[in-house]
Image: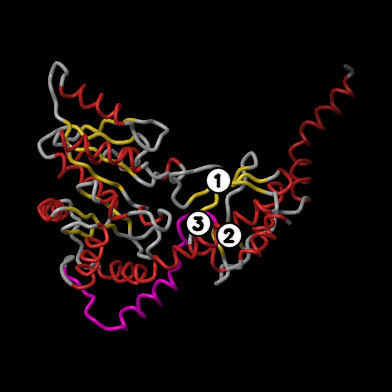
Amino acid sequence: MDRRHFLTLSMLGAAAPTLTFARQAASPAPPSFPPVDARSVWLVGDAAPPNAEHTAQRLVELVQRGGKPRDSYLANGAVAELEARFAKLLGKEDCAFLATGTLANHLAARVLAGDASRVIVPHESHLYRDESDATQLLSGLNLVALAEGRAAPTLAEIKAAVDEAENGPYPLRVGAISLESPVRRVNGELVDLALIREISAYAKTKNIKLHLDGARLLLAPPGYDIAGTAALFDTVYVSLYKYLDAPFGAVLAGSKADIAKVRDLRHRFGGTIYQGWPCAILALGALDDFEARHRAAFAAADQLFAALQARGVATLKPAPNASNIRDLVLKPKVAEGAFDRMRVAGVRMLKPENGVIEVYINDTITRRPVEEYVKLFTG
């Protein structure tokens, strides 16, 4: 290669990043979502993202309705009303307000395990993967994780884990089993009720207690037997902020004896905050019409999926244990531009992957007529 040719190639190489940047700068940027307003829709997530101004206005509105919502160190007021409401909803004797779901899961495992050192958990559960080993570090419990990549372990897997603990060279006792349903990490899948019944029946024969991380339990399809499911567990946790409008908080329901222990431990772990009424009153307000809004959202989603299938542009993947997430398989031409069409119209959703999009059902879907979504999908 001669020197002149070499220098030419060298200069081109050095200029390549600048040329690439210039081409990128010249290409039009994708359109941004329009400002959030009353017509904004989220086909992703459990609800619309929290809005501080709306939350403050809603809180004032609920306080002005009357009554005495204020609690004192989580006693009386709206907190007590919320606890009673959830105890009834979940069919339990008592219920405690807690600041976080992490604390709810931890205290449930600690109380139910008693003197035993082992607790069986699903590998994909929040208790195992999202709580920084709090249960192990602060309560000395050994979490035995099963069913990696699946919603829940089989009964055979649980029996094998219990057998391994009880019949090893140094016998140990499994004190509790925790299940999560719906499972966030497994596409919001609900654990099959038949399996829960099997696990519950077996646990009773071994005097093993059962806990349900039901953070998103109320997002199960309309008609799902929430109280019947809760009856199979000794304790049940439900989140207050994922779709019930509270800025934080959780409830844990169970027997009077177990919840009394939870309240004692709540204080020892620094969780007896001075006032919880702002969370409680917002969650109570959301509960008042939650079922009606939930049914309307699922009805709208069913109409949308049926319309898309009738037009031959999409099909639903079978999901017998789905909660509020559905896998929609789009025709290639539809999938290609669906995300951008939705973005321009102010509808948030995930980008399709290999022609499949996860559609989350929440009450924002009722902000627009179904036919409008059909047109956005089909182009």
Residue 72 at what x, y percent from top left? 16, 70
Viewer-nearest residue: 2 or 87: 87
- Circle 2 Cα neighbour tier, 10 Å, few/some/many (<14 / 14–19 / ≥20): some
Decide which of tag 1 and tag 2 comes sooner along the chain.
2
Please give the label number shown on residue 361.
Answer: 3
Q: Which residues are magenta?
A: 43-72
Predominant SS along the magenta part: loop
Specify whether residue 127 is painted magenta.
no
Q: Name which residue lies at 37% across and 41% down.
A: 192
Residue 363 at what x, y percent from top left? 48, 64
Q: Distance between the Cα atoms at labels 1 and 2?
A: 15 Å
Residue 307 vertical position relative to residue 82 in the rendered view, above or below: above
Q: Are marks 3 and 2 in contact (CB under 8 Å)?
A: no
- What amino acid type should be assigned to the residue bearing mark 1? Asp
Indicate left or right for 212 with 12 as reference: left
Q: Are marks 3 and 1 in contact (CB under 8 Å)?
A: no
* Disc 2 target residue: 303
- What amino acid type should be assigned to the residue bearing mark 3? Ile
* Disc 1 target residue: 327
Indicate left or right for 238 with 348 as reference: left
